[in-house]
Amino acid sequence: MAARTLSLTPPRRRLAADSRLALLLRSPVALLSALVLIFLLLVAIIGAPLLQDLANTQNLRLRFFRPFSLERGWAYVLGADALGRPMLAQLIVGARTSFLVAGATVALAATIGTTLGMVSGYIGGVVDAALMRISDIIVTVPSLLLALSVLFVLEPSILNLILVLAVARLPIYLRVSRAQTLEIRERVFVEASRALGKGTSSILWRDIRPLVVPTVMTVAMLEIASVMLAAAGLSFLGVGLQRPDVDWGTIVSEGREYLTRAWWATVFPGLAILVTALAANLLSNWMRASGDPLQAAAMGVTASREEAARP
Amino acid sequence: MTTEILKRPAGETSARPLLSIAGLRVRYGRTHAVRGIDLDIMPGESVAILGESGSGKSVTGKAVMGLINPPGKVAGSVEFDGMQLVGRSEASLRAVRGPGIAMVFQDSLDALNPVFSIGSQIIEIFTVRLSWSGQQAREEAIRLMLQVGIVNPESRLDDYPHQFSGGMRQRICIAMAIALKPRLLIADEPTTALDVTVQAGILKLISQLQRDSGMALLFVTHDLAVARQVARKLVVMYAGRVVERGPIDDVFHRPAHPYTRALLGSNPGSVKHWSELKPIAGNPPDKSAVFTGCAFAPRCPRAVRMCSEREPDFVTVADGRQSRCHFAQEMFDGR
């Protein structure tokens, strides 16, 4: 019955890039999130090199200059901090570092953590036990302490900061992807792949990865905000980024001291982190849904066929 | 292996069995799923394993494929075309899986990866296993889909599993299983999850594919009527052991084991009115139990004291007919 109905509908297009874009245009929340992220990225890439000097220009007469006034020029529109540095310029310069550190950390931790988690969950046995104990150890040591001690030995640089944070954040991905793999491993299509003589690497890549990645993506997007704040914590303790390098987290922790006198020194960089994390999250949610053929169908593009095919 | 050949009676050497299971045991800790079964399948032969849930029939199928995951332990011998499969590594089993033995699973709804189109899943078999080009694989995929009765295969290649009905999905699973032209197809209750109306079509397809390609078939089911439609030979399992074996129609008409007879009596198709149905009293035995006598004795209407004290041998009651019962001959003779 289903077959007859279906044969009447025109040959379908694949759920490829063009229809994915069409789906994005239909979802206002996802579209807005994508635009916000693109805007922030462009600002970071283009604006940061131009404003590097301005962001670090101190002007003690403009100490705690109040926001929303243009009399000192647009750079001071969001006010100035305790040393009279313009907030807007700092935010723009900080965006680049924040994106770089958070993006690279999350990407590195997610890639390595997910790969290890999938292998650990699928192969099991000694490999699994060893990896999970290592992960337990990392979790047991407070990540800040771990990062602190490593950065104390190594010299604090952006690269070292990324490496240390990535190691500290690895267990989350390892555990999430392992748990997912354990579940997917038991599903019939994995057994069917084995019964067709497919190898372990082929099964991991084709059968398990596509179902693990969406979950990991959602976790990774949540992690962006945590990593930005963790980086700030390290800067605060003197082993993270140091001026003239600045990121949003650093600005938040510097402004915290003067919270009662100048709320804007904390709120604006905090808002920047919030907006980025929120946009990344909403977008990743949408990506997860649109990457799943069933949900993508429910989202619109293949709705009519979907209805027809339902047994 | 030499001893195996020597053990075989002279009359059978003319055709060597394609699959030869001897003393196969599968256990999970103290749970015994399969307690030692022997079974030969000749090339092109169709055999049904019949048993209720928990009798070890599905586990037997998986054990043949080497799909028993730890902590499950497999002992005994499974020889496919002279090659011992038990104890072989996953990597070396890969050569057998697909072109040697293939499998169709019970849960067709979950047997396809939900995030890839069914076309890409069929095509992948050829590109990964045979290193074919995409175009060649695509053409073969279309041919296969047509062969298993998918209408308009070209237009359905890019559809995802959720866009197919249960029966269609099972057809695709069958297409994938026969893609590498296996010499033995294991079908593990392939119609159990399907509507009765769809079942018949799937059974017909499997029978037809089996006849056309000359592959052997091991059909696992709990449904006697289904078994009769696809298989010539019947193996009845109870509590992880084979209790009766023989040509299917023969067993159907003259069961030589009380369990088989009870199964026939509890089959709704065998009676005119439901009140004539005779359910088998009691429950299947605990899988961790250790038997001193016959496993069926507690539920058996014919059981005497001897039954719970001494395990019956697998006795031959007629040519090609065997039964594991102290009263096998009497049962067979209709007494």
Image: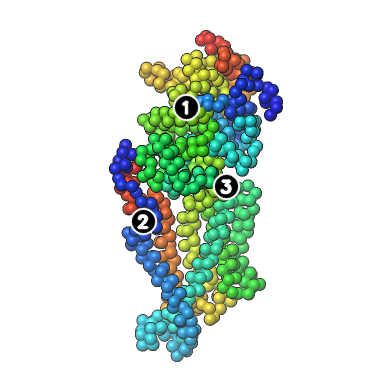
User: Which-is-in-front pick, marks 1 and 3?
Assistant: 1
Residue A42 found in image quarter = bottom left
Q: Position of residue B226 (x, y in %)?
A: 44, 25
Q: Secondary structure at mark 3?
A: helix
Residue A283 found in image quarter = bottom left
Q: Is residue B6 above or below residue A4?
A: above
Q: Residue at x 63, y 57 (%)?
A: A134
Task: Name which residue type carries label 3.
Answer: Thr
Task: Name which residue type carries label 2.
Answer: Ser
Q: Position of residue A159 (x, y in %)?
A: 58, 71
Which residue is label 1 attached to? B211
Q: CA distance from mark 1 to mark 3?
A: 33 Å
Q: Position of residue B4 (x, y in %)?
A: 67, 26
10 Å neighbourhood of mark 2: few (<14), some, or many (≥20)?
A: some
Q: CA distance from mark 3 to mark 2?
A: 32 Å
Quadrant of the image for the N terminus of chain A? top left
Task: Name which residue type carries label 1.
Answer: Arg
Give B71 or A209, whichever is nearer the viewer: A209
Q: Is residue A303 visible?
A: yes
Q: Are marks 1 and 3 in contact (CB under 8 Å)?
A: no
10 Å neighbourhood of mark 3: few (<14), some, or many (≥20)?
A: some
Which residue is label 3 attached to? A200
Where residue A19 is drawn, which disc sits there?
A: 2
Q: Chain of mark 1?
A: B
Give B324 or B191, whichever is nearer the viewer: B191
2 and 1 marks on the same chain: no
Q: Residue furthest bottom?
A: A61
Q: Secondary structure at mark 2?
A: helix
Q: Residue at x 55, y 62 (%)?
A: A109
Q: Is residue B131 above or below residue B311?
A: below
Q: Is residue A18 above or below residue B50?
A: below
